[in-house]
């Protein structure tokens, strides 16, 4: 595959010889800061949609729009759903068009989505297209290359670099709710979206910093295959990949409806602080559990099962407590295990599908996740429209993660599938797989250690999931797929 013309300048005089990542220096840290900003802006806005939701809901109710809650929630859920759905395509485009061009196009689309949304705030159906789809596509095209570029500038400190960048979504999720609330009060819904569009335009400037230092991967038959069907022959992966989307039918519901839910149950209390707590705890969880996943013989699938079970139970408990202090504690629990769930996606994909299969394994998983992430908040809003209460929607939102944690026991009931790579790589994996992780967490921190191994530069994909970044000289594809923290 050939990269974009704009990336050609990154080749060394001998185009076949990649440059060594500098692991520091002004340019490297500027690239890291730009990636941090991209991730923070995109997933900070996605994760704090609950603040915007309250204002959009009020506008729709004032206009006497029927099913206002479900329609308002669909705008935000379409955004994150589109971000995930386009993630596999974003990886392919990054390979074909180059890092700079793909990021710049993503920044333009994200900016255009926000800008156009500011002119159609009175038409929720138009917001589906501008805020939900256009901004979501831009977010996906920006996120993937913003992580890929780190592998061009960091090798020894790649884990630290990815950890700092992944923290961007959590930092912005913590910092944005109150300034966003102020903007909405001061400038209104339309004016706030104009200012957010101006913020999104910073991504275009960030793209100019993403000058790759390595040539695109050489064209080989294994690299040019756009669809890897072998991953669907791995029974453990199939079970896992179908179980994860099951959990996500309820996963994004609190992010969209939490602020409104608090206003209906705890008069005078500020629901935005719960979003802040979830984002803060999620950042801590990503770092902590990402490191735990690196410990030899840790059962990552069991750890992810525990995280889903705890998220589900905590979501359901939100409906039965009459104490706002308890709500804060539950929000912290949800955020902590949210970080656990996200940080384990990459390592598990590498464990089940091997190094070469992990790229498309993560991409396909994200594509599957797009549907429940879109449908879940919409159904919760629809129930609120008809019941006038969030008790049942939040109770039901806690059920899918618990069900997922039970389904994942089936992964242990099928025999291991052999991970077929080329002979050298297969021998390497047999020797190293039981001793160390094959990947970093999904879009977060603990990097796949090199330790002098041939596969040392890779890490699992943000979110809110993310791509794997290659070590210099690695001939595997340069992208795995993301979240922000989202989840993102």
Image (cartoon, rainbow, N blue to C red):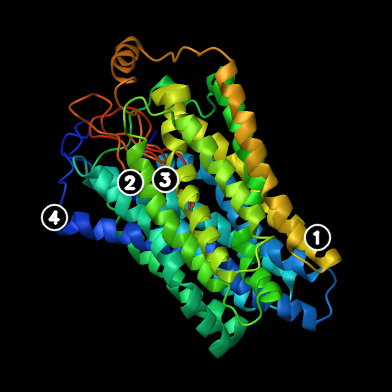
Residue 322 rendering spot, x and y as whole percentages: 66, 68
Mark 3 element type: helix
Q: Which residue is mark 4?
A: 25
Mark 2 in CB contact with mark 1 (< 8 angstroms): no
Residue 166 rendering spot, x and y as whole percentages: 37, 53
Q: Is residue 386 above or below residue 372?
A: below
Question: Which one is in front, 6 or 302?
Answer: 302
Q: Earlier in the sequence, mark 2 or mark 3?
A: 3
Which circle, 3 or 4, is nearer the viewer? 4
Q: Earlier in the sequence, mark 2 or mark 1?
A: 1
Q: Which residue is mark 3?
A: 97
Q: Earlier in the sequence, mark 3 or mark 1?
A: 3
> How far, Cα to Cα, is label 3 from label 4?
27 Å
Q: Which residue is mark 2?
A: 445
> How far, Cα to Cα, is label 4 from label 2?
20 Å
Question: Which one is in front, 415 or 115?
Answer: 415
């Amino acid at each position: 595959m050939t990269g974009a013309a704009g990336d050609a300048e990154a080749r060394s005089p001998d185009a076949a010889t990649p440059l060594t990542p500098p692991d520091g220096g002004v340019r490297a840290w500027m690239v890291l800061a730009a990636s941090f900003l991209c991730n923070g802006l995109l997933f900070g806005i996605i994760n704090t949609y609950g603040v915007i939701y309250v204002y959009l809901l009020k506008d729709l109710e004032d206009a006497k729009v029927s099913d206002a809650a479900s329609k308002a929630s669909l705008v935000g859920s379409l955004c994150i759903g589109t971000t995930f759905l386009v993630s596999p395509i974003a990886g392919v485009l990054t390979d074909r068009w180059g890092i700079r061009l793909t990021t710049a196009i993503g920044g333009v689309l994200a900016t255009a989505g926000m800008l156009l949304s500011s002119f159609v705030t009175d038409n929720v159906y138009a917001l589906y297209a501008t805020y939900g789809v256009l901004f979501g596509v831009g977010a996906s095209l920006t996120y993937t290359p913003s992580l890929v570029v780190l592998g061009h500038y960091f090798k020894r400190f790649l884990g630290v670099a990815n950890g700092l960048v992944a923290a961007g979504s959590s930092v912005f999720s913590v910092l944005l709710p109150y300034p966003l609330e102020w903007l909405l009060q001061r400038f209104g819904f339309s004016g706030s979206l104009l200012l957010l569009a101006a913020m999104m335009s910073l991504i275009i400037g960030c793209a100019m910093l993403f000058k790759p230092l390595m040539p695109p991967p050489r064209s080989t038959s294994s690299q040019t295959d756009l669809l890897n069907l072998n991953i669907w022959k791995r029974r453990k992966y199939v079970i896992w990949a179908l179980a994860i989307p099951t959990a996500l039918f309820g996963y994004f519901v609190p992010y969209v409806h939490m602020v409104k839910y608090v206003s209906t149950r705890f008069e005078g209390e500020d629901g935005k602080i719960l979003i802040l707590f979830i984002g803060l705890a999620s950042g801590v969880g990503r770092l902590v559990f990402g490191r735990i996943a690196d410990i030899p013989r840790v059962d990552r699938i069991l750890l992810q099962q525990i995280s889903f079970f705890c998220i589900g139970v905590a979501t359901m408990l939100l409906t039965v407590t009459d104490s706002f202090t308890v709500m804060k504690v539950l929000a912290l629990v949800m955020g902590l295990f949210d970080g656990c769930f996200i940080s384990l996606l990459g390592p598990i994909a590498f464990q089940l599908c091997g190094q070469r299969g992990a790229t498309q394994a993560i991409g396909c998983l994200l594509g599957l996740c797009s549907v429940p992430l879109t449908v879940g908040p919409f159904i919760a809003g629809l129930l609120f429209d008809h019941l006038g209460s969030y008790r049942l929607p939040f109770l039901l939102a806690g059920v899918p993660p618990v069900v997922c944690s039970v389904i994942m026991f089936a992964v242990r009931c099928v025999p291991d599938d052999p991970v077929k790579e080329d002979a050298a790589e297969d021998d390497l994996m047999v020797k190293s797989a039981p001793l160390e992780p094959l990947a970093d967490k999904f879009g977060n921190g603990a990097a796949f250690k090199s330790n002098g191994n041939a596969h040392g530069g890779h890490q699992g994909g943000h979110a809110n999931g993310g791509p794997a970044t290659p070590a210099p000289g690695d001939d595997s594809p340069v992208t795995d797929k993301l979240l922000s923290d989202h989840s993102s």
